[in-house]
Amino acid sequence: MLRYTINRILLAIPTLIGVAVLVFFLLRVVPGDIVEIKLRGDGGTVTQETIELERKRLGLDRPLYAQFGEWMVNMAKFDFGISMWTERPVLEEIALRLQLSLQVAIMATIIAVLLAIPMGTMAALFRDTWIDYTVRILTIGGLSIPSFWFGMLIMLSLLAFFNWLPPITFTPIYVDPWANLKQLIWPAMAVGYRYCAVVARMIRSSLLEVMNEDYIRTARAKGVYEKMVISRHALRNALLPAITVIGLEFTFLIGGLVVTEQVFNLNGIGQLFVQSVSRNDFTLIQGMVMLIAAFYVFVNLAIDLLYAVFDPRIRYGQ
């Protein structure tokens, strides 16, 4: 297991380097100039000489290979540079919003897992009964309804029935847990509903397949209690595909909640992505893409290691 973990970590290095090369050079091909947007975006009259001086100050007049080399060296030191728009450190800009998006993703994951496992299990065990049909209707609704639209329904319901809306100002959970939960529980529920639907349907289909395996019939023939057969033999193996879905959905939530954040007025990573792209803020976009790529690599590694926990037959490195 240790050898496998080390190999996967080493394989992550060329993956991240490849992402860095792609995002750096593709951004330079995209039309638009941040200096033009910054100085002339509001209709201001700025001379071409001033624009050239600003480009030189930001280092945009240097050859691409020199810019790329400097960025890679600095990134190896965990220095992602300065935002070309706000002129603040990229890590500082990301950190201000990452805690919000990360908390929403974690809360949505907890809600989804706590609901999806019993729902998917009950639907598989009581196949073609009213329980199964109810779970199917709920999960199909979760897959069909966009998260931002469900969030709008939550906001309208809170306003119509309770004459109350969540607070607008973000309060970290370590400052005031109650104020924090009052604001973030609603977007977590809106996102967690779809998340729960995906995982529940995956567990249902996997469990139905596993229950027809030979080792399940053998365990029953030996007189093992049905609860033990389901919990220790069937469900553990049925959770393997669900673990993959849970991990991929979690990483998606880190930067994929643009519209949902707009509905709940959350200034998270999604909104920061939109702002940086509209401004052609190269350094900030590069930092966020590398952050999400690192999240994907780390989560995929964690998923592979969890396989061995749920299925002891798996032996990596053999």
Image (spheres, rainbow, N blue to C red):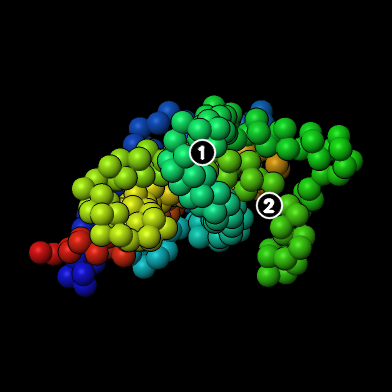
Q: Which mark is residue 270?
A: none
Q: For the residue labelled by badge 1, is the local secondary structure a helix, a strand or a loop? A: helix
| x and y percentages locating residue 148 in the rendered image | 63, 34
Please name the amino acid that badge 1 sits on.
Answer: Ala
Answer whether labels 2 and 1 touch (C-beta < 8 Å): no
Specify which label sits upstream in the sequence, 2 or 1.
2
Which residue is at 17% across, 70% downward? Answer: 3
As displayed, is residue 177 above or below residue 183? below
| x and y percentages locating residue 85 in the rendered image | 56, 47
Which quadrant does the N terminus fall into? bottom left
Determine crowd level at label 1: few under 14, some 14-19, many 20+ residues with C-alpha closer than 10 A.
many
Which residue is at 25% across, 49% downward? Answer: 217
Which residue is at 33% across, 52% downward? Answer: 234
Give me the C-alpha separation between circle 2 and circle 1: 20 Å
Q: Which mark is residue 197?
A: 1
Task: Looking at this view, name the residue that lies furthest to the left.
Answer: 318
The reply, left or right, for residue 169 in relation to residue 63 is right
Q: For the residue labelled by badge 2, is the local secondary structure a helix, a strand or a loop? A: helix
Question: How many badges with numbers are in the image?
Answer: 2
Asked whether 253 or 122 is in front, the reply is 122
Q: Which mark is residue 184?
A: 2
